[in-house]
Image (spheres, rainbow, N blue to C red):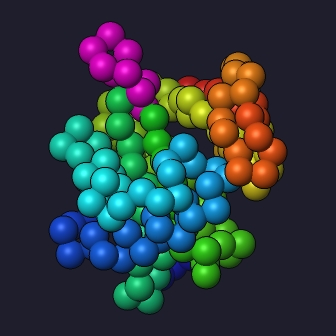
Amino acid sequence: MEQNLITRPSQSKDEDGIWEIIKEVISSGDTYVFSPNSSKEKMLTYWFADHIHTYTVIRSDQIVGTFIIKDNHPDLGSHIANASYMISPKHQGMGLGRQMAENSLIIAKELGYRAMQFNIVVKSNERALKLWDKMGFKVVGEVPEAFKHPKQGYANALILWKKL
């Protein structure tokens, strides 16, 4: 694991750097449910909501990634975590995704979650699916036409799960 990678709870001073990553990641419209035209205010309100644990990933004093951990469902479903991850496109392909995933699973367990579930992983997102498979996630379901892909039209999405 890279020595100079720092993962810490996000602070308000991180918002502009996190927004730059979010803006770039959602701009293609092919992996996240958020509209590519989503405003900074909308996305930061979501990413920093009170019920969400938000993390900043820093390398060499630069924000290179962010992830959130939250209850997959309220109340009787709150023991299962849900998470979202974004890496600056300039830093993709360097193993940051795996490091962020490993860190998030440790953090989720420390927060008291018993498992992690992803509700909508676009089936064509091969990079993410390969990572989650390596991390031990299992496909537990497939939802037909769950994602409005800009090039493929209505695409299937997978539900992934892993016990912590």
Residue 132, relative to residue 96: is it above or below?
A: above
Q: Residue at x 48, y 76 (%)?
A: 64
Magenta region, residue range: 72-81
Could you tell me if residue 30 is visible in this image? yes
In this picture, residue 40 sits left or right of residue 115:
left
Residue at the farthest bottom position = 60
In this picture, residue 164 sits left or right of residue 69:
right
The one nearer the camera, 30 or 12, is: 30
Where residue 114 appears, x then y in whole percent? 44, 25
Residue 77, relative to residue 87: is it above or below?
A: above
Q: Residue at x 74, y 34 (%)?
A: 154
Rendering quarter of residue 110: top left
Where residue 141 appears, x then y in whole percent? 70, 19
Residue at the farthest top position = 76
Where residue 71 appears, x then y in whole percent? 35, 30
In this picture, residue 159 sits left or right of residue 51:
right
Magenta stretch: includes residue 75? yes
Residue 120, relative to residue 105: is it above or below?
A: above
Magenta stretch: includes residue 2? no
Where residue 53 appears, x then y in whole percent? 29, 47
Q: How many marks?
A: 0
In this picture, residue 100 sits left or right of residue 146:
left
Q: Residue at x 41, y 85 (%)?
A: 62
Which quadrant is the N terminus positioned in? Answer: bottom right
Could you tell me if residue 129 is visible in this image? no
Q: Residue at x 53, y 58 (%)?
A: 36
The one nearer the camera, 162 or 16, is: 16
